[in-house]
Image (cartoon, helix red, strand yellow):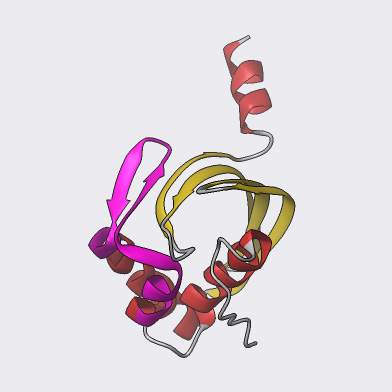
């Protein structure tokens, strides 16, 4: 499936959110090309407090692509619930569903970012939540 877009996150944040994960996991282009299309060279993603720079993101995607080639990851879908672009600031609330080994894992993501003047992302701060885990933990502790 070709989901590539030449629009920047500043032009179409929802389009970026839906296409970026697909392109990185299933795309034919090199991960560096995809990363550079949407992000500045100094881009840093802070995911649940853990900073991931360009090299760490590339290191993360290589095993994902290997699992895709082996048929272990068969789908990755993003459902965008809200986006906001205000000047150089962006925000998004979306759900990522990945199918690994036939089992779907759903993650809610709350993302805040900073755009460079060219519309690419310079920084993202995001927090994630797996629905149902808080209730399970609360039940375990009671």
50 displayed left or right of 37: left
Q: Looking at the picture, how far across and down is residue 18, in whole percent?
A: 64, 66
Q: In this view, does 45 lie above or below 97?
A: above
In this rendering, the count of numbered labels is 0
Name the residue located 58 percent from the left edge and 13 percent from the top edge.
141
Is the residue 26 above or below the residue 108 in the image?
below
Q: Is residue 127 magenta?
A: no
**In the figure, is residue 23 to the left or right of 49?**
right
Quadrant position of residue 1: bottom right
| Nearer the observer, 125 or 79 | 125
Vertical placement of 135 versus 132: above or below? above
Q: Residue at 33% across / 41% down in the picture?
A: 50
Whether residue 55 is visible: yes
Residue 117 position by quadrant = bottom left
Residue 140, image x, y percentages: 60, 19
Direction from residue 63 to residue 96 in the image, left or right: right
From what the image shows, is residue 77 above or below residue 34? above
Say whether residue 43 is left or right of residue 6: left
Q: Which residue is drawn at 31% across and 51% down?
A: 52
Please name whichever residue, 116 or 36, is drawn nearer the observer in this view of the structure.
Answer: 116
Picture coordinates of residue 25, whole percent (x, y):
49, 75
Nearer-the-camera pick, 94 or 5: 5
Name the image quarter holding the C terminus: top right
Most extreme residue toward the left is 55
Q: Position of residue 105 (x, y in %)?
A: 62, 54
The magenta span reads 33-56
Q: Is residue 60 visible?
A: no
């Amino acid at each position: 499936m070709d989901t590539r877009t030449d629009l920047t996150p500043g032009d179409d944040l929802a389009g970026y959110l839906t296409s970026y994960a697909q392109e990185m996991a299933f795309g034919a282009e090199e991960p560096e090309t995809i990363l550079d299309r949407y992000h500045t060279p100094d881009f840093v993603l802070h995911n649940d407090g853990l900073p991931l720079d360009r090299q760490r993101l590339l290191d993360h995607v290589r095993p994902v692509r290997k699992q895709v080639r082996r048929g272990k990851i068969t789908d990755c879908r993003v459902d965008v619930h809200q986006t906001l672009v205000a000047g150089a600031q962006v925000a998004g609330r979306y759900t990522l569903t990945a199918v690994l080994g036939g089992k779907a894992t759903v993650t809610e993501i709350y993302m805040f970012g900073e755009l460079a003047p060219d519309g690419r992302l310079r920084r993202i701060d995001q927090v994630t939540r797996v629905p149902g885990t808080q209730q399970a933990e609360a039940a375990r502790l009671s």
